[in-house]
Amino acid sequence: MYEGALQDLIEELGRLPGIGPKSAQRIAFHLLAADPADVDRLATAMQEVTRTVKFCEVCGNVSSQQICRICSDDRRDSSIICVVEEPKDVVAIERTREYRGRYHVLGGAISPIDGVGPDDLRIASLLSRLSDSSVAEVIIATDPNLEGEATAAYLARMLSPLGVKVTRLASGLPVGGDLEYADEVTLGRAFVGRRAL
Amino acid sequence: MYEGALQDLIEELGRLPGIGPKSAQRIAFHLLAADPADVDRLATAMQEVTRTVKFCEVCGNVSSQQICRICSDDRRDSSIICVVEEPKDVVAIERTREYRGRYHVLGGAISPIDGVGPDDLRIASLLSRLSDSSVAEVIIATDPNLEGEATAAYLARMLSPLGVKVTRLASGLPVGGDLEYADEVTLGRAFVGRRAL
């Protein structure tokens, strides 16, 4: 146990995700030895995020404006919407440079165990985006795990009556991976999804 | 890449020790979703540490006062000084409840590779604490690694002419450990330091 402010800081840091007591102590001593101007910059950056970061009114992604950069970019194809769980998924897909359509961020996946149902996700706003029939395809890019698959199945059922093409990202062997070490479900999916060469 | 404030925060967090890009992103989204009052509390705790935490004028440990809690506690035995590298070592030793003497924090260990020499450590203030001959024993509790051992050897050489008893923490097998998995240096030390039962 340390005295006063140092102990307070260690306890506050320990509440962050992925920061255990040892890491909290290490970061606290780092900050103690750091230039006060650097510490102020970090503290301000934290407070700025809660004050200035908004969620895009169209797609639900994080944004510094009411409408995010991607939704307000006319060069992007507005006839395709890629549905993801979280803003970090948008960043991951953007990094591939393979996709030039729009996004829709659900804000999570259906997970009864965590008490997250369809009504807790931004599904109503997705349906209203599809109502003007300018959208030709919805790509469901939720995570390939239990919750993501359940969400994908639910969305597919909701969207099929609307006449829009609904697709799902391919499952299979990761590039650079090793067939021997692939789990049986992934390998099974790779067989099902095999393509003609 | 995110927009504005969120990207700034991810970059600032990524400068902390042990926080990689993925952890920085995870913490940033956690803070984004957190109660602004909690974020303010963390930001304030960081700034408070750089402003209010001092180093004890006697032992060099972190302290909220000019003289730390341990140095100003009359019930502690002032005839024994335990020399450690860092304030976190004081906390580790206090947790054992085996030691009731005073401390001296060097602020590191001699490490030529990192450019840390004896003059960069609080050795002069240790010598001045020993000048009034009320100290009977100095326990050297630097880390049992290369730098810590070099520092211990240097201190032993400096302190021997002063007529004070200089001791070193025992090296040997960790309690609850497994003899089979002990490295040969530790096992060798355990033989050298064996005790009669």
Image: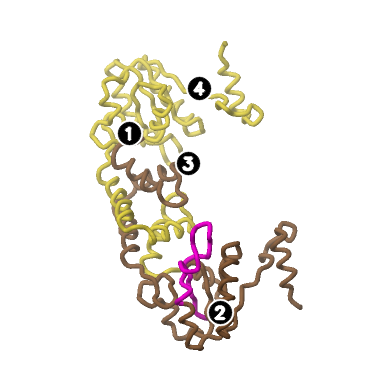
Chain colours: A brown, B yellow
Q: Quadrant of the C terminus of chain B?
A: top right
Between the residue at mark 2 and the residue at mark 3, the CA separation in whole angstroms equals 64 Å
Q: Amino acid at mark 1?
A: Asn
Q: Which residue is mark 1?
A: B61
Q: Amino acid at mark 3?
A: Ile
**Seen in the image, is A86 located left or right of residue B63?**
right
- Say which chain tag 3 marks: B
Between the residue at mark 1 and the residue at mark 3, the CA separation in whole angstroms equals 25 Å
Between the residue at mark 2 and the residue at mark 4, the CA separation in whole angstroms equals 70 Å
Precedes in sequence: disc 4 or disc 3:
3
- Comparing labels 4 and 3, the label whose residue is closer to the camera: 4
Between the residue at mark 4 and the residue at mark 1, the CA separation in whole angstroms equals 23 Å
Circle 3 — which element? helix
- Comparing labels 2 and 4, the label whose residue is closer to the camera: 2
Q: Nearer the viewer, residue A132 or B18?
A: A132
* Displayed quadrant of residue B151: top left
Expressed as whole percent of the image width and height from the top left, the position of residue B18 reads 47, 49
Identify the disc placed on residue B113. 3
